[in-house]
Amino acid sequence: MITLEEKKSWWEEYTYQDKINENVPEAVAISWKKCRQANVDPFDGRGKRVSDAILESILKENQWLMEIAGPIMQNLFSIVMSSHFLLVLTDSCGYILDTIGDNAINKKAENLRFERGMLWSDEEVGSNAIGIALEQDLQIQMAGADHYCLTHHEWTCAAAPIHGLDGEVVGCINISGNAEEMHCHSLGIVAAAAFAIETQIRQRHSYDLMYTALNSSSDGIVLLNNEFRSIWMNRAARNILGMGLEELTRYDFREIMSDINWENTERWKAGRPSNRTDCKLKFDKKVFGCSASVSPILSDGRITGFSVSFNKLETLFKTVNKVTGNHASYTFDDIYYKDPLMGRTIQLAQKYAKYDGCILIEGESGTGKELFAQAIHNASSRSDGPFVAVNSSSLPRDLVESELFGYERGAFTGALKEGKPGKFELADHGTIFLDEIGEMPLEFQAKLLRVAQLHSVQRLGGKFEKKLDIRIIVATNRNLKEEVLQKRFREDLYFRFNVLKLNIPPLRERPEDISFCAHRFLEHFNARYPDQKKEMPEGFIRHLLAYDWPGNVRELQNYIEKTFYLSQGSFLSEQIPLAEFSDGDGFAERDKRRNFIGVMTLEQRETENIREILQACGGSVEVAADRLAISRAALYRRLKKYGIRTREYRTSL
């Protein structure tokens, strides 16, 4: 074993004769030469303190390292406390961050200024274990004259670098004491301490990654112990539940989430999570509808807890609505019109958009009832919410209730095992549009009335009613008043829907819109096929005006498209037959229109027609006479004959 005296002689050879003894360790020899080149005084070696501002910056930057190393250094000090050794932690440059020692060793360290805030690199204080460990990235033990400076010859030091996640040196752990008390186990102790700190760095990084990932999740996540009590929750869980961990720990999750089969021990031991399912979270008087799944936490094959992942159904509904396209695309700017009659209809619809009352839209097929419904939604305070459109005539009679109200799991044979929300739930905080409401089965209308009155819905097989924040818009191409008289539509449901009524005039009653809309449709096709642009001659326009358009704007758009494709040259041809185009659906729609107001006498039909036009014209006899293609005198005679008072309509808009 090499003695301190031998080390002293080797140091003197180099200091006075510039000769490196072959027994000097290579790492020490490299450091000695470096110190001589840097003109380090071999008879000094006391540390130099940095300013308070720099020290504060250094400590702040390395706070994380001090937090990790602190407990390990405390444990280590309890082991070596009786041997009067000093534990030192430095940053990657050699600045001392913390020291732990007894009074005797601390006093000795003060003489060397071996304390917090000192830079303990080779260039500053001469060769030492800290400087060599950091500079050469190795574990090293030095004693006596291994140190370059004479003032350190009373010390023995063992140091090990601390590595970060990428293998870079982030600091150093050192143990120092009297040279005469040097122990061969000192290097092993600091090596073990450095390894423990590095392990904690990796674990902390893993924890930070997990914590960030769990907290960035939109799902609420709660971790439970094996007694089903919460021990951790993420930020989303706090926001969803409106409570913190301290309050949540009062609850047994088996009681607040009773829909989950917590006794499924076989599944849990196999490490299999539960299927994600709709369930209720019940806290005293609060009930949250949510979609949740539970995963077991296993340790050595034993169940030590559970991870519960959940989210409010409203959040999932937003995703469903986004994926399924439950949103309104059209606004009032997308409605083509020039005729004043249509302009007043739009003004009335814009007024309705400000309120949440039910709206009944009546009009023939092809007049744009859903277009108006979407425009009303987008002009309302609900524009950010969903717009769920339902065609009542397309719903199978035996599935109407489940489609509109939804169902819980196991509600009926063939039901999805996780249950399914209905259209009304999906429309929460938005608008539901029930098209062709006149086709709704009579036996279902009583249930629909209750939802329309209370704005709450209960799923099939469910036990709880869910309060909804919705706006209901219904539309029909039938005369619902006549349907009520014929006992095909409930009177109470009719009055519930008929809070705000909107009649969309057919295209034949607004001739200015025929030409205007035709030109707008042509512009669209010209833009789409710029190398085949076409114009609309006067003869073609007269051709359009001479037709009564039973399919309304939809038929007009389709006719312009077909004519654009089939016309030769640069002009739309009036030779494309309208009757041939509208044969079938068009004529059927014309027949529907003729029966739209039910079975009436000619005088009843004329009376009804005059009333509708007066209402649409705001009670203006001049405009109404023009629409009816009769003189004002003739109109006055009919008004007197049928007992119609125009002042009743002057305030209708």
Image (cartoon, rainbow, N blue to C red):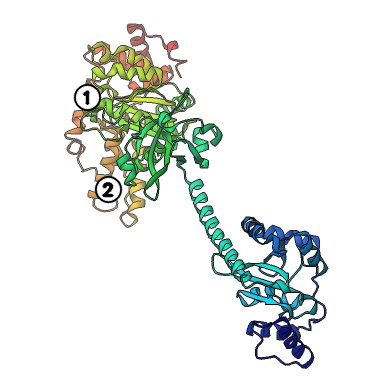
Say whether residue 358 is visible: yes
Q: Nearer the viewer, residue 240 or 383?
A: 240
Q: Is residue 259 above or below residue 563?
A: above
Q: Secondary structure at mark 1?
A: helix
Is residue 153 found left or right of 423 in the rendered image? Answer: right
Q: Secondary structure at mark 2?
A: helix
Say few, some or many: other residues with alpha carbon within 10 Å of mark 1 (under 14 / 14 to 19 / 20 or more). Answer: some
Q: Position of residue 129 (x, y in %)?
A: 68, 74
Q: Position of residue 128 (x, y in %)?
A: 71, 76
According to the picture, the residue beneath numbered tag 2 turns out to be 564
According to the picture, the residue beneath numbered tag 1 turns out to be 592
Hey, which quadrant is residue 580 in on the image?
A: top left
Q: Is residue 542 above or below residue 622?
A: below
Q: Please identify, in this view, whether the residue under mark 1 or under mark 2 is nearer the observer.
A: 1
Q: Position of residue 510 (x, y in %)?
A: 35, 29
Q: Nearer the viewer, residue 133 or 283?
A: 133
Q: Residue at x 54, y 64 (%)?
A: 165
